Amino acid sequence: MEGANAIESWDFAAGFFWAVLEHAIYMWLFGTTICLFVWLKAHKHFTEVIPTRFNRQRREVCFTLAGDNEPLFVPWESLCAWVIQSHSATQYGATRQYGMGMGFEHEGEWVTLEFQCAGAQLGIAHWEAVRAYMAYELDDLKAMQDPLGLQGPNDPPHEGLHTFRNARAGLHRRLREKEVGWVYAFFWYVYHVMTFWTLPNRLVEWEIKRIDKTGRRALPQAMIDWSQPLPVEQRAKPSNTLVRLSAKVRTLIKQYPRHDITEIFAHVYRAERQASDNT
């Protein structure tokens, strides 16, 4: 009886597989086509869009409006940033959308730049990355983006095969120095085998080469001149207000290390507004 049930289950599974195979192939082709279209369109943006640039030596941000070739140079401390969250209900349930934006006032109107994020905390992290770059004088690429030590002295700044090799060398070093055990190393290899070993790194390198081959839109001469380094004596300094508020933020972070950074910023901002209203 058990053998008959097993045969019936196998026949059902085989019949179901062949019944949905054709539809699955069509769905795979459709999904692949959509992904390929989005991927190609994203690469085309490099030839159409002039990127926003941040210059901490001048303490300015350079924007280029859509359809305009003349860049706008905005003081860093006049820039506004926000993280948005919206809710919507569909027939499949409630969904949430998140985004991060920046904006400034230009000729009596607000100019904004927004993009989607996977979550509210990720949107805040995007802004914190920009703010940290402008606030802290870190000129070493390794100190800015490589706390795990995955970039060698002569490695390119992007991820690639060198990232994987450096990570594996770092794992072996930590094993020799008894920082981690063999169990950690075993699962490190298991994880990378399950994620196709060096295939993701090779795909990153291939995409970077393709972007370089596609080319980028030429920058306006005014932006090129603005991006040149300045002598130390000509570099802009933060305002006294920003220095004072930053000191308050650092003090509160030391006092309340477990508090969310956004709550600390909001507290300092409210105190500043109340003080200005009272005066």
Image (cartoon, rainbow, N blue to C red):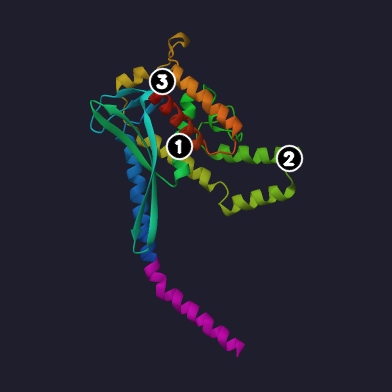
Residue at the outermost front position: 278
Q: Residue at x 43, y 75 (%)?
A: 18
Residue at the outermost bottom position: 1
Placement of 152 over or under 122, stated as above or below: above
Given residues 121 and 60, the one toward you in this image is 121
Given residues 149 and 99, the one toward you in this image is 99
Q: Of label 3 and label 1, which has the lower sequence position?
A: 3
Q: Secondary structure at mark 2?
A: loop
Closest to the camera, between mark 1 and mark 2, is 1
Q: Picture coordinates of residue 252 (x, y %)?
A: 56, 30
Magenta residue span = 1-24
Q: How many marks?
A: 3
Residue receiving disc 2: 179
Q: Mark 1: which amino acid?
A: His
Quick one: label 2, few (<14), some, or many (20+) residues within 10 Å?
few
Magenta-colored stretch includes residue 108: no
Quick one: label 3, few (<14), some, or many (20+) residues within 10 Å?
some
Q: Secondary structure at mark 3?
A: loop
C-alpha separation, residue under disc 3 versus residue under disc 2: 42 Å
Per the rendering, the mark at residue 126 is 1
Residue 115 seen: yes
Q: Picture coordinates of residue 170 (x, y %)?
A: 66, 38
Q: Quadrant of residue 55?
A: top left
Per the rendering, the mark at residue 60 is none
Closest to the camera, between mark 3 and mark 2, is 3
Per the rendering, the mark at residue 59 is 3
Q: Quadrant where the N terminus lies?
A: bottom right
C-alpha separation, residue under disc 3 versus residue under disc 1: 18 Å
Q: Residue at x 74, y 48 (%)?
A: 182
